[in-house]
Image (tube, rainbow, N blue to C red):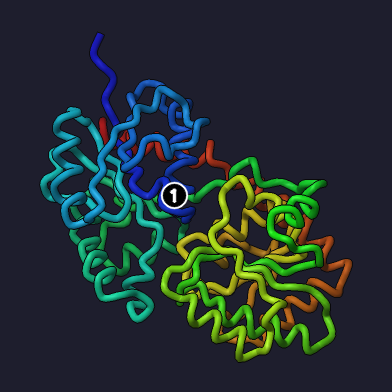
């Protein structure tokens, strides 16, 4: 009996603060063993203990504690793949020319190419390597039809090489009866609130959410604003927006929120505001919908595709449009209830089991 082909999944984002990339990796690892029982699976990460306990034990944990991406990507990861005799590697964004086995690469978005001014010089330099990586890979997975088209256009790829596989929504996101009590105990918030989820960085456009919230308050709507996300270089701009709008004490910056705390935060919120300037997919919008919370989001990029007609979408450069949409959701009971029902139905279409099954089909295609 021949040994099972080994698929090596790069999980370097795991344990470094919740991001869409980390959610993607962890949720795929939970589902891939059932989706591809004929394959051996291993993940590569800095700290194997950071992988959640519910990832099946038949996914091997391989330690690669190299923080410098200019060492890890071109040298350390390919060397580990050779030692393990990997038949296939699944990476994010980067494929080293030193990698001896075929590769599947996931590209979550190319915001660094479309809006380079939102990224540091160091990040732009590293992400410049994606052009060669997607050409080296046997297949490119994009997380939405929008991102698939963007990648093909930006890098001139054969469309047959790029596959759109939407993200899923973890089953932990659902309406919770005790959500308000949990949020009160954990975050000290005991009034109705609008929720904004996203790292504090320019692309997430949190200052516009604060300006829209200020307009909402000026119209007489009473609620707080909660911003959940770690600092990625944008905290000063967010604090400036709070001071400029005189909202100190009404805007709660709760920082990075652990996975186990997010469902209650989504479920307790009156509405999610997500005015991101660029998203490959927009997972927080669907997580909120699954939690029974209406969504007001940008009408551009992959976010509009994820939300569809189950939420309200607006111009992400207009605080006035954003405030108007938030006011409609908060003050129109019929609209609120329609969006809750539509959001729940839409979120149910996006499952990680489905995403893992489609990903396993890509592995089989490449290995064949």
User: Residue 121's quadrant in the figure?
Assistant: bottom left
In the foreground, 305 or 259: 259
Displayed quadrant of residue 222: bottom right
| Res. 160 visible in picture | no
Q: Is residue 57 above or below residue 116?
A: above
Residue name at image x 53 percent, y 59 percent: 256
| Side (left or right) of 156 relative to 312 | left
Q: Secondary structure at mark 1?
A: helix
Residue shown at 20% from the left, 43% from the top: 77
Residue of label 1:
22
Q: Which residue is at a point 67% across and 84% down the rendered structure image?
A: 321
Q: Within 10 angstroms of label 1, few (less than 14), some, or many (20 or more) residues?
A: some
Left or right? Give the position of 256 relative to 29: right
- Is 274 located above or below residue 39 in the figure? below
Nearer-the-camera pick, 62 or 103: 62
The answer to whether 329 is drawn above or below residue 228 in the figure is below
Relative side of 121 to 37, left or right:
left
**In which quadrant is the C terminus drawn?**
top left
**What is the x, y in percent for residue 153?**
32, 68
- Which quadrant of the rendered structure holds the N terminus? top left
Q: Nearer the viewer, residue 301 or 317?
A: 317
Tally of marks: 1
Q: Judge by depth and name the residue closer to the eye, 41 or 304.
A: 41
**Quadrant of residue 69 within the rendered picture:** bottom left
């Amino acid at each position: 009996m021949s040994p099972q082909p080994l698929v090596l999944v790069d999980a370097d984002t795991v344990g470094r603060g919740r991001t869409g990339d980390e959610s993607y990796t962890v949720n795929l690892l939970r589902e891939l063993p059932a989706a591809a029982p004929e394959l051996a699976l291993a993940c590569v990460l800095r700290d194997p203990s950071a992988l959640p306990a519910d990832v099946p034990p038949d996914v091997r944990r391989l330690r690669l504690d190299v923080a410098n991406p200019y060492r890890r990507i071109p040298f350390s990861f390919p060397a580990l793949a050779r030692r393990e005799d990997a038949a296939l590697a699944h990476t994010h964004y980067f494929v080293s020319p030193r990698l001896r086995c075929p590769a599947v690469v996931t590209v979550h978005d190319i915001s660094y190419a479309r809006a380079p001014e939102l990224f540091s010089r160091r990040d732009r330099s590293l992400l410049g390597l994606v052009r060669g990586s997607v050409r080296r890979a046997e297949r490119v997975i994009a997380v939405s039809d929008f991102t698939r088209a963007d990648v093909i256009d930006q890098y001139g790829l054969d469309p047959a090489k790029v596959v759109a596989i939407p993200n899923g929504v973890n089953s932990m996101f659902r309406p919770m009866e005790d959500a308000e009590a949990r949020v009160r105990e954990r975050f000290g918030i005991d009034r109705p609130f609008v929720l904004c989820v996203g790292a504090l960085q320019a692309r997430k456009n949190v200052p516009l959410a604060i300006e829209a919230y200020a307009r909402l308050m000026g119209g007489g709507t009473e609620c707080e604003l909660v911003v959940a996300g770690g600092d990625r270089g944008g905290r000063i701009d967010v604090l400036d927006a709070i001071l400029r709008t005189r909202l100190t004490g009404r805007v709660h910056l709760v920082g990075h929120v652990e996975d186990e705390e997010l469902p209650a935060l989504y479920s307790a919120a009156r509405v999610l505001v997500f005015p991101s300037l660029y998203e490959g997919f927009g997972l927080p919008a669907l997580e909120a919908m699954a939690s029974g919370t209406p969504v007001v989001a940008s009408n551009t990029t992959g976010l509009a595709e994820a939300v569809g007609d189950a939420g309200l979408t607006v111009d992400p450069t207009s605080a006035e449009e954003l405030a108007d949409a938030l006011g409609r959701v908060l003050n129109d009971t019929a609209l609120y209830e329609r969006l809750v029902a539509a959001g729940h139905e839409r979120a149910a279409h996006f499952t990680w089991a489905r995403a893992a099954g489609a990903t396993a089909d890509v592995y089989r295609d490449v290995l064949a």
